[in-house]
Image (tube, helix red, strand yellow):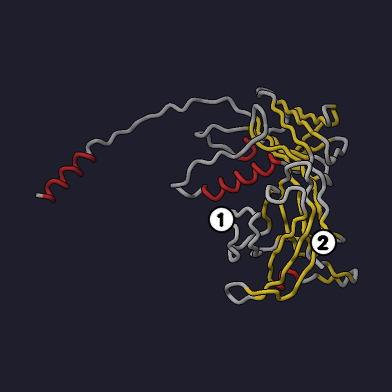
Amino acid sequence: MKNILALSVLIFLSSCERDVTFNVPTQPPKLVVNGISSINTPIRVNIGKTANILQAYTTDMYRVTDAFVQLYENNILKDTLVYNATNNSYLVKRNTVAMPGNTYLLKAAGNGFTTVEAETKTPKTITINSITRRVNARTDANGNMLDEVKITFTDDGTAANYYAFKVKRPNYLNGNTMVYGGIYCMHSSDKDIDRRNNADPTDFENCIDQEFFMSDKNFNGRVKELLLFIRNNELEGFYSPSNNRTYKSIVEINNITAEHYKYRKSYDTYQDSEDNPFAEPVLVYSNVKNGYGIFSTYSIGRDTIR
């Protein structure tokens, strides 16, 4: 009897299937601005446009190459950005670079698009007080020897600060310029580090790859001491016989805006949930009015691991 009942339910459910057509309303395209510039480089942005969810498109179809883009510094027109086909981005004509403490407003207009704008204030440069290294300070769970890298810096107490840390090793010499690459599987139990894949901020064994973020909510205006533990071979120097010089690993502290911080955190969450059918929808943060994307500037503090 149970088998007959189950078969009857299956036949009933299968007989209820039908195709349903949804009419997805067409939305007018909007401009998308993406540009995060450091104080040491000319301001540059990429500009594209949104695409309909049902529209098949290529990268070239997404790109906008004829926008009119202006840059204001402290409410005064400073520069115009012109499209550069070599790198598919808009670059300032007068080589304008962001200065700490200054506010920058970007306005972009395109044929058939609503004008968009985004504003950012460049944070102050953070000076690294000291970086020290202690060889073979401890081991990880697999018995690998780790060196301790201690970083100290003084937080600016006049503002809420957000930081992006990068630890880089010398990879190869390109002409006279050393090319650095990120270090993988750094360890720390510092509670202020934002963990991307683990909610426990003190999980020492959870690897931190290439970069990490933190805010100053727990050390505003004070000296911050940060301990990282890294495999010894990742911190080995690079000797160049061409100039008889040894290049060492470096630490970068990027003082970023709140908008930059929110964008990166939401974008990382979006990437982590992209292939998860059970994840909640993620809306990537944007500070572009009437459009989408991010426009921001940041300062860099850099020193060598000795």
Chain-order first, disc 2 or disc 1: 2
Q: Distance between the residues labelled 2 and 1?
A: 29 Å
Q: Label 2 belongs to which residue? A: 130
Mark number displayed over residue 279: none
Residue 177 as seen in the image, left or right of residue 145: right
- Asked which quadrant contains residue 90, the reply is top right
Tell me if mark 2 has few (under 14), some (14-19) or many (20+) residues whose alpha carbon lies within 10 angstroms of its own. Answer: some
User: What is the total number of numbered labels drawn onto the structure image?
Assistant: 2
- Asked which quadrant contains residue 161, the reply is top right
Q: What element carries label 2?
A: strand
Mark number displayed over residue 197: 1
Three-letter code for the amino acid on which mark 1 is drawn = Asn
Three-letter code for the amino acid on which mark 2 is drawn = Ser
Identify which residue is drawn at 65% across, 38% down.
Answer: 60
Identify which residue is drawn at 46% across, 28% down.
Answer: 24
Tell me if mark 1 has few (under 14), some (14-19) or many (20+) residues whose alpha carbon lies within 10 angstroms of its own. Answer: few
Identify which residue is drawn at 71% across, 28% down.
Answer: 117
